Image: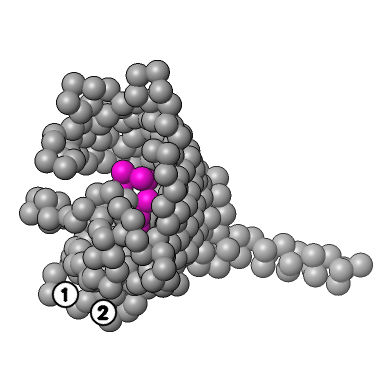
Amino acid sequence: MKKHFYSILTGTVLFSILHINIQAQSYTEKIVLGPGKTIKMFSKDSSDLVQKQGENEMPMKTLSESVTEIKLMPNSTENIQLLTTLQKIKIHFEGYGQKMEFDSENPAKQEGMMAANIKDLIGKTDSLICDASGKIMESEEKEKSKGKGKGMMRRMQQGPNFENAFLLIPKEAKVGSGWKADKEKDGIRTQTIYFLDKIEGNIASVSFKRKSKGTSSMEIQGMQSSTEVDNLSDGMITVDITTGLVKTFEETLKTNSKMNMMGKEIPSTGVTVSKVRFE
């Protein structure tokens, strides 16, 4: 009986020690990346949008799959240089009464109005800089020089977002608690509320809810336009807490926007689903 009691007591103490160690799990305070490291980004996106012009509704559906290589370069500062190369992409688009397909690995599916612009993106290497927290920093010149293909993909709610490759968890965060992050870019304010669901080994599961609101301006075919945005999304992230590198990212985005161009308002609503895997 006494032996059984001590076995239970020992087991309880061991469980308590393990529980304390898990709760005291430390998170990296900056992105940990070795120079020369290569990350593969596998993206699947789908969007189902409806644009309205006057009384006419125009449904638009887009499906895309892409593989992007992210290579880390050695730096003399804390900032990290990333070389990104789009290796392959498939896009199926239905809208404006047309169906269009593009497949970078199938020459028979490289025609149509989107083909020329997207072809130029395949195999092209771009340089990005991110800080120690994984935030992508782009100069004004870099923003202005973005190609037509990338602009078109952004308008179709497609294309990689490299900030999704990184996530730092605050040192005070515990399983069952959350934190928030605010940012503003191109006139759009975004607030994200993260919730730490669980930790298994070095991998944390984090759910999130996000709201973006504001007005951005851009040039389309030489004409200035502005877009009012009021979007909501939620999703799930798995991340290595010792490096800040994301393993998987999923987001369901409910879009509600209104484009103003040449004195006309073009409202757009719909849902975009993004699924990304990093290896």
Three-letter amino acid code at disc 2? Pro
Question: In the picture, residue 77 is in which quadrant?
Answer: bottom left
Left or right, 23 with reference to 38: right
Q: Disc 1 marks which residue?
A: 75
Is residue 193 toward the left or the right of residue 16 in the image?
left
Percent across and percent down for residue 173 are: 44, 49
State the residue position of label 2. 35
Compared across the picture, whether 62 is left or right of 82 comes to right
User: Residue at point 45% right, 54% down?
Assistant: 92
* Residue 90, position as x, y percentages in the image: 43, 62
Which residue sits furthest top? 55
What residue do we see at 23% from left, 22% from top?
A: 264
Q: Residue furthest right?
A: 1
Image coordinates of residue 100 in percent, x first then y, are: 41, 52
Q: Quadrant of the C terminus?
A: bottom left
Q: Identify which residue is drawn at 28% across, 65% down.
A: 119
Instruction: Tally the numbered discs.
Output: 2
Query: How busy is the neighbourhood of tag 2: few (under 14 within 10 Å), some, or many (20 plus)?
Result: some
- Residue 31 lies left or right of residue 147; in this view the side is right
- Residue 99 x, y percent position in the rendering: 44, 48
Image quadrant containing the N terminus: bottom right
Nearer the observer, 228 or 79: 228
Element type where label 1 sits in the image: loop
Residue range corresponding to the magenta coloring: 154-161
Is residue 245 in sight in this rendering?
no
